[in-house]
Image (cartoon, rainbow, N blue to C red):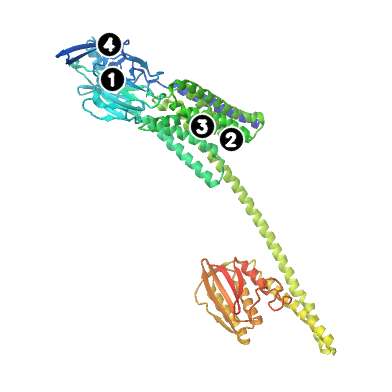
Amino acid sequence: MTKNQKYLLIALAGIILSVLFTVIMYLCRTDIPVCPETDGVLSEFRYYFDEAKNEWVSEESSAFIGEDITAVRINDFSDLNVIEKVNYVPDEFIVPSANPLSYDYQTVSLKDFTFAKSGSIVIFLLNLDPTDPNFSEETKNLDGYKIGDYWKFSILLPKIFTASNVYVNSNLALSSGEISDYEFIKYNTSDDRVTVKHVSETERNVLELSFYTRREALSNQVITIHYQSDSETMTGLQDFILVGSSDAVEQVKVQYPVTFLVALVVSVMILFVLIVLSFLKKTKEFIAETLLMSGVMMLALANYALANVTSLPLFLSSLRYSANFVILGAAALMLSKNFPLKVRLVFSALSSAGFVPAFIFPYLSYGATDGIFMTVTVLKILAALSVVTLIFLPLITKTVLPPYLRIFSGAIVTVNAVSSIFILPTSEVLKYPPIWLYFALTVLSLLTVVKIIAATERENAYITANLNREVERQVKDIKSVISERDKLLQFLSHDLKKPLLSGQNYLNTLIEREKDSEQTKLLNIVKQNDKKVLDNMTEIASYAKLNYVAEASRSIDLCEICQKLYEYCSEDCKASGIMLKNTVDKKISVFAKPKGLENALTNIILNSIEHAECTEIVLSLRTDKNKALLTISDNGKGISPDIDVFRPYISENNPETGGLGLYICKNIIESMNGELTFECNEGTAFTVALLKA
């Protein structure tokens, strides 16, 4: 099997497996049963005082269930049911339980209805029919929900955009946000608050409902929702209403935010890892995966926040709608990595084109929503097709094939985008296939990064191993060069000295025998030059013997070094009438080469004895931050600042008669990361700067 064939097989497998998973999970899910709409006639008696007639009036209202209103009855409840239809009065806040049958309701389905910007939603939850001949049997069927003299149920209200007040019968049960110009006393005599301006807030709420069990005093429950939205698109109820046992309803309420909280935590952790690795590795390799996790994080954050209490419902809805395009754009960027920049930009722009219309969708006017919704849907399909194209495009263009994990990620993103168009979210979120595909996407992204890092580390380990071998080879070559140099220097300094020494002896004999003063003068010049060459060869011999390059630096005490110098050079100083002073009496450790340092310092002292014409030489020591500064100063004639005494064959007296002494000293000091300098001020001071240990 060729590489291209293997790639094609993996790409097809990624798409097919994602499709199969989505289809199988969708077909195998068990939908929450819809609570059937009950039938019959709902009657209500109202007894009130008519001030115009100055008498009490009895009034009866009736409505045909299924024609005038929609209602459900508790004997049709199971552990968990969906209420699909509600009663609706647009642009008006009705009085809760004040003869609710006197209003002209619209019976609407929550599947596809668009609510006005404000209005009233009424849910009739009816107790058992006392005239039902099967009343006793129906009562026994409800024993599982009976607590004391009541049947207990819970109802889960979905998000209500974007502010609401909810009444159970005539009592205010809960409020979310604030409705503008709302006087509570009109609808609830126990509350005199007034809210002036609109304040957005949405949340999913659970209401506890109690139904009296005695046949002679059965009561119904009427839930009235007053809502007001600051959007024409996101209004009223945005999902189905759930009703059932307290445990089942509470489980659904908790399951939804917890699932998205887990997704949020996982995506944030992976996103953090990607960002940290990008900074540590100083690489742009993970940009696509970072964007991908950012999209998943946006989606999880929006859904989690909307499942709880939020004051930003429209913004979070925008985030939720547009996150899919961030994920599609990231997938396109990830799969087009090996293509030219123009191709990458085209495909990434195509996949991200729906971000803006999807983001502004909740803020649009009602008349523009249909067009924008269709545009967003078409762009999502086109973006998914562009990602599929990028999966198979390398096979046609012979571009470098992307890693297999990225192929699987692209396949999941594509299937997820398309399936989210046709598969609506469910209240039982764990049965919603795209959720699991997003979890798979986070795992694949993490594995992709781990694989890239592992490959990089293997490559670095290989390079390091080869580099170590190369360093060892070069060190060996350098040692060979140093060895050859030492042999050559020994030859120059030892073997070539023999004929020069012999020549000096002959010169001495000739000078003794020569009577002509001019000839004697010339012979003395030759003898002087011969001596200069011999002195240089002696210094070269010392340089070769020392081999300061090979000596390793270590921690040494400068106080001990100065004491050795004093003991070694004091006799030479006395013989020349010079006083040698050692003022170093404090232990200071430095990194240096002991033999090389002793040789260099001795050479400096002897150079002062021979050339400085001084009466005093002083050794002193001071510190500066992380350095120790050892100074050898004399009170001699000094050195002209125009002369570089560290150059070979330079002398302070005659530039043509100098040697290698100070040049070698400087090289020795610099080989141990030190520095040798001098200054003239009533004499000469040479300072050696070394790093403190």
Mark 1 lies on residue: 94
User: Could you tell me how far apart the alpha carbons at marks 4 and 1 are, in whole angstroms?
Assistant: 17 Å
Dot 4: what SS? strand
- Name the spot of residue 296 as percent of width and height, x first: 47, 33
Among numbered discs 3 and 1, the one appearing first in the sequence: 1
| Mark 2 surroundings within 10 Å by alpha-carbon count, few (fewer than 14), some (14 through 19), many (20 or more) | some
Dot 3: what SS? helix
- Mark carried by residue 403: 2
**Direction from residue 430 to residue 518 in the image, left or right:** right
Whether label 3 touches label 1, CB < 8 Å: no
Mark 4 lies on residue: 63
Whether label 4 touches label 1, CB < 8 Å: no
**Direction from residue 104 to residue 665 in the image, left or right:** right
- Name the spot of residue 17 as percent of width and height, x first: 53, 26
Depth check, mark 2 against mark 3: the one in front is: 3
Among numbered discs 2 and 1, the one appearing first in the sequence: 1
- Mark carried by residue 126: none
> Looking at the image, can residue 16 be seen?
yes
Depth check, mark 2 against mark 1: the one in front is: 1
Name which residue lies at 50% across and 44% down.
Answer: 276
Mark 3 lies on residue: 327
| Mark 4 surroundings within 10 Å by alpha-carbon count, few (fewer than 14), some (14 through 19), many (20 or more) | some
Q: Amino acid at mark 3?
A: Ile
